[in-house]
Image: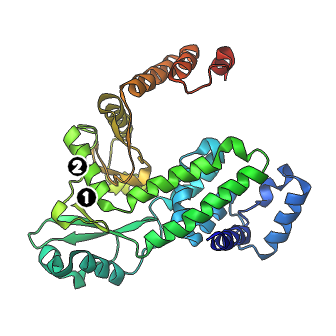
Amino acid sequence: MPLRRLTRLIHVALTLARHDALIPEEYAAGVPPVVRLIGKLTRGTERRNAGDTPGQRLAAALERLGPVYAKFGQFLATRPDLVGMQTALDLARLKDRMAPFPRAQAVAAIRAAFGADAERLFGDLSALPEATAAASLAQVHRWTLPDGREVALKVLRPGIEAQVKRDGDAMRLGARLAEAFVPGAGRLRPTAAVQVVLEALQKELDFRFEAASASAFIDSGAGAPFMEAPAPDWERTGPQVLTLDWIEGAPLSDAAAVEALGVDRPALAARVVRGFLQGALDHGFFHADLHEGNLIALGGERLAAVDFGIMGRIGPNERRFLAEILWGFLRRDYRRVAEVHFEAGYVPADRSLDDFALA
């Protein structure tokens, strides 16, 4: 309903304002006087802390608004070209350090998903430990099955489907209003950006898609031998619960834990790049969410990828274009890079090739 969407949008705006993340004081000089005045008035009820950066305040506001907005913040964290490097780094904490939901709710969700078979499949779930990691849509519990295998139980946040529907509608409305009334917003294509995030979210709400992607990633050899991956347990997987082999290691987001493993950092960095390029260029199938929280250092040069909720596929032509663009950048042949963009149709044909090469 339009009124409900507008009400939610107003709530979002007020929450951003209270965190001084709607019109940050640091950027007030670059906006029209009337917008500057609105920013000054809304900062009267702000919750900013001394020394906080705009990105930190934005992260806190998005986390408070809930999983859908946190997911949008994760998307922004991958685009330092749009939000700036410091803000992207500040938003990175939304990737894998969200507050967990109660353990009892996770147990209830697993029992509801598998019914009378839950205890047979998983054992005594009353002993399920607290979550080891929590993200915007789900959290992970380390668990030992009756047959002795250690697994990761990934459980969807309770009520998340309704939240995605409610906040998705509000975000679409906000994007349309931004394009209509905010000067310069159109070039950032907020409506398209919101739609990309929401489409990805819909796939992530059914863990059977993620299990299928993990299986396909392993079966295709898309990451091997540079990246390992946990295999899904299909008998113990459903729309709201995903069971995967447990991966023992340290996420790259935990610098201290990675350092304690004594990893070979240059070799690990090479594996990340080579694993991605092998999947994309050789197989046309790749992990499309390779942020540091989804990469696990296993010690030495070994590396594993987790969380297969967002995967990418590109066809033969796109694979060739990607290879030529990367090769052009490595050789600093920017004119060839520009030509490939025109050949691929990524830049309108009526634009200047020379100007694009210079850019």
Q: Position of residue 172 (x, y in %)?
A: 61, 58
**Residue plotted at (43% across, 58% down):** 202
Quarter of image, res 332? top right
How far is disc 2 from disc 1 in space, using C-alphas?
A: 19 Å
Specify the amino acid type for callout 2.
Answer: Ser
Q: Is residue 174 above or below residue 119?
A: above
Q: Where is residue 356 in the image (x, y as percent from the top left)?
A: 65, 21
Query: How many numbered discs sit on the rendered protein?
Result: 2
Q: In this view, does 228 lie above or below 114?
A: above
**Residue nearer the viewer, 162 or 337:** 162
Specify the amino acid type for callout 1.
Answer: Glu
Q: Judging from the image, what secondary structure is the residue with disc 2 in?
A: helix
The residue most toward the right is 33
Is tag 2's residue or tag 1's residue first in the polypeptide sequence?
A: 2
**Residue plotted at (47% across, 68% down):** 98
The C terminus lies in which quarter of the figure?
Answer: top right
Can the viewer see residue 84 in this picture?
no
Label 2 packing within 10 angstroms: few (<14), some (14-19), many (20+): some
Q: Where is residue 230 in the image (x, y as percent from the top left)?
A: 23, 53
Q: Name the residue under label 2.
A: 215
Judged left or right of residue 188, residue 114 is: left
Q: Mark 1 points at which residue?
A: 248
Q: In this view, does 295 lie above or below 98?
A: above
Quarter of image, res 171? bottom right
Q: Position of residue 67 (x, y in %)?
A: 50, 67
Quarter of image, res 170? bottom right
